[in-house]
Image: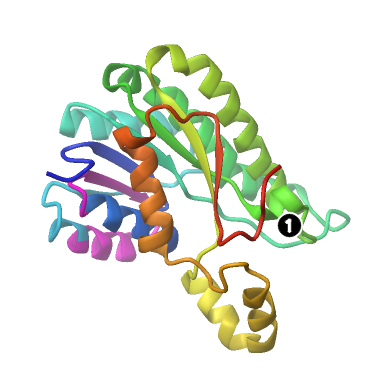
Amino acid sequence: MGRLQDKVVIITGGAGGIGSGMARAMAKEGAILAVIDLNEETGKQTEKELQAISPKSMFLQANLMDTKSLPGIIKTVVDKYGKLDVLVNNAHASKQTTIENATQADLDLSFGTGFYPTFYLMQAALPYLKESKGNVINFASGAGLTGQETQGVYAAAKEAIRGLSRVAANEWGRFGINVNVISPLASTPGVEAWSKAQPEYYETVKNKIPLGRFGDVEEDIGAAAVFLASKESQYITGQTIMVDGGSVMLH
């Protein structure tokens, strides 16, 4: 029996990078995964990999910017499995730009793929999370916590998610629902491409991480997500968990 045995987990942006790392880690602990992603090709591949571990897991293609379709994602999963235990809002797309040059389209992309889906999926999932006394895991970023240049539209959406998460933790604690945030630093395909394009800068950044490396999407970020989705974290809510090798140390 795994720590998440037969728990039904939704992960947005679950077909690659941190999302797929979390999905694998959770599947190995017995969870049934519903992976939500826009990319059908990688989604189907992820579904195949997950079903080898957790046969009931599935991929569901969705455009998270279509806010009217978001309640339908929750309904589809609950109709299939009969319940929902964990909602992981991981998906987020954004464009790097200075505040001076940011456009409405840049803001729409960041909030439309990050904050709004997080809000509406949490809202739609609430009745089912009440029944399961479930968990919500949202995602923040060191870019918002440190005010990283050229990340204004991304940081704004990420900090909005943190604020929403704290309010939900207060409002939903009475229902036995835990709401927490992971702020990760991991070796994703994007980071790997960057390491090849700018190896000196990559090494400089890596050497500033107290633990001296970028995190593994499954063994580090996935392990933290498993913990937050399990009974082991039942007395933790409203917190931002820095899974970043010590890069940002909260006061």
Residue at horizontal 41%, vertical 63%? 217
Examine the rendered structure and indicate whether residue 247 appears above or below residue 196: above
Examine the rendered structure and indicate whether residue 81 appears above or below residue 204: above
Residue at horizontal 68%, vertical 72%? 208
- The reply to whether the magenta stretch includes residue 39 is yes
Q: Quadrant of residue 122?
A: top left
- The reply to whether the magenta stretch includes residue 14 is no
Say which residue label 1 marks.
151
Q: Position of residue 121 (x, y in %)?
A: 44, 31
Q: Is residue 226 visible?
A: yes
Q: Quadrant of residue 83?
A: top left
Residue at horizontal 72%, vertical 44%? 156
Part of the protein shown in magenta: 28-49
> Foreground residue, 34 or 7?
7
Q: Is residue 61 visible?
A: no
Residue type at the position of mark 1: Gln
In the displayed structure image, the side of residue 37 where residue 131 appears, left or right = left
Residue at horizontal 35%, vertical 59%? 20
Q: Secondary structure at mark 1?
A: loop
Q: Position of residue 240 (x, y in %)?
A: 57, 40
Quadrant of the snapshot with the N terminus: top left
Quadrant of the snapshot with the C terminus: top right
> Foreground residue, 9 or 250?
250
In the displayed structure image, the side of residue 120 where residue 110 appears, left or right = right
> Foreground residue, 124 or 162?
162
Q: Residue furthest right?
A: 100
Q: Position of residue 38 (x, y in %)?
A: 40, 54
Q: Position of residue 106 (x, y in %)?
A: 70, 52
